[in-house]
Amino acid sequence: MWNGELTSALETVLRDTVITDDSPGTLLHDFQTMLDFVRETEPTLTQSQLLKLQSLRPLNTALKRSIDHGLTRPLQKSFPNINGLYLLLRVSGLTVVQIREKEATLILNEPVVEIWNNLNADERYVALLENWLFRGDEAVLGERGGLLGYNRPFWLWAEFVRDMLMGRRRGDDWITFTRYRPKHHNLALMELFGLVRITDGPTVHKQAWQIEDVQITAWGQAVAALLIGTVLEDDRIWNRLDSDDEWVSDLLYETLIPYRPKLQQQLVLPAQSFQPGSYVFKVSLSPSLWRRITIDAEATLETFSDAILRAYQFDHDHLYLFRYPSPYGRPIQAFHPYMQEQISVDEVRIGDLGLQAGSQLLYNYDFGDDWRFDVLLERIDAADPTLKGYRLGEKRGRSPQQYR
C-alpha cells in the first residue's frame, strides 16, 4: 500500500515513463484534436463563452477518451473530458475569444501556437499540467470559480490523492461526491494526464457520466509524491498563484527537471504590450440603461471608476473592484486602493489590459448595495490628443437612485 512518500521505485517511474500522444494518458492526442477543431472551425460560442451543442457529440467521438452519458440535451459540462480540455485551451493562452459581429468566436492565438509547436512531448505535457493545476479557474467554464484557498485545482487534486490514501474514498456515495469535489472535469483531466484510471459504469437514461471506480496509477503516485509535498511545503506559493508570472512555471520545472531532462523550454506567453488609443466603452445597468464613455489608454482603472460614477451621478464613498479577462482566459480582479489587494486600480492602465473590441468587464461598486455594471469595449479609436482622461458621451435611461 502506497503511503504517499516518494520511494526509489516511484523515482524510477518518474524517470522511465515515456510521454507520447497516448502515454501516460491520452492528453496530448486529445488536446491536439481540440486545437485542430478550433483551427478548422473557429467555433462560435454560447453567451457564457462555451462550446455549442452541435460541436459536443462530434468532438466527443473524435477524442480517444470519449465519455458516454444518457442526457438528451447535454451541455458542455455533460462531457467532462471536453470541459476539461476546453479549460486547458483557454487558460494556456493557446486560444483567445474574439468578438465577431457580436458573437464570441474561439480562435487560435497563433504566436503562442508557434511556441507550442516547437515544444517536445515532455514540455507540452508539463505546460498543460502547470496550467491546469495553477491556472485552471473554473470561472472560464461558467462556474463561480475564483482561485481561492481550497478551490484551487492543485489543492483539489492533492486532497483527492490524500483521501484515497487515507481510505476516505470508500462507501457507496464517494463516487457520486466526485461530481462536487474535485468535480468531473478535474477528474477527467486526472485521467487524461494518466494520474488515475477510471472505470465507467453502464450508461443510465437521462443521467450524467456514470463512474464505477477510480484508481491512482503508478505515474499518478509518482507525480503526487513529488509535487504535493514540494508545493505544500512552500509557503510562498499561496501568495503568488493569483499572478500570471513565471514564478509558478519555474517552481514546477525546477522540481521535475532532475527526473525529466528533456524539459528545456516552457510555454511562456509573449509579453503583452501597451495598446494606445481612445477606448470607447458602453457601461450598462440594463439593456435600456447605459452610458457611453471614451477614455484614454493612459488612464487608470481608478480614473475609469470616477468616470462611471460621474456618468451615473453616484457618489464616490464606497469600495469597488473591476473584473477583466487575463491572457490566460481566467478573470483578474483589480481592487480599490484601500483594500490593499495584490492588484490595485491605481496601478493598472486601460491600455495594459490587452482588450479588443467586444471585450467585457465587470465594475462592481459598493459591495453592500452591490451595483454591478456591465462594461463592453465597443471599439478602440486612434489616440486623441484633446482627450484629457475621459469624456462622457451618449446615454440612455435615467440614473437610478443610488441607495435602495
Image: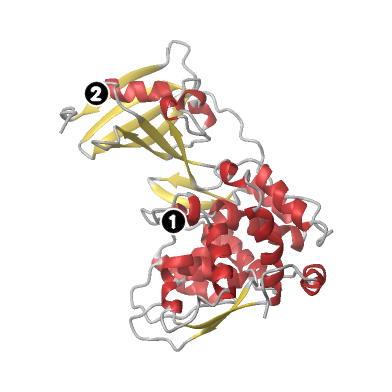
- The relative height of residue 320 versus residue 96 in the rendered view (above or below) is above
Q: Nearer the viewer, residue 252 or 350?
A: 252
- The relative height of residue 251 versus residue 78 in the rendered view (above or below) is above
Q: Residue at x 40, y 34 (%)?
A: 322
Q: Quadrant of the N terminus?
A: bottom right
- Marks 1 and 2, the one that precedes in the sequence: 1
Q: Which mark is residue 151?
A: none
Q: Which mark is residue 314?
A: 2
Q: Is residue 306 left or right of residue 67?
A: left
At label 2, which amino acid type do we have?
Phe
Quadrant of residue 124 within the rendered picture: bottom right
Q: Is residue 336 left or right of residue 147?
A: left
Q: Is residue 5 visible?
A: yes
Image spot of residue 27 (x, y percent) = 64, 68
Q: Residue at x 23, y 36 (%)?
A: 369
At label 1, which amino acid type do we have?
Thr
Callout 2: SS: loop
Callout 1: SS: loop
Image spot of residue 111 (x, y percent) = 66, 45
Q: Residue furthest bottom?
A: 202
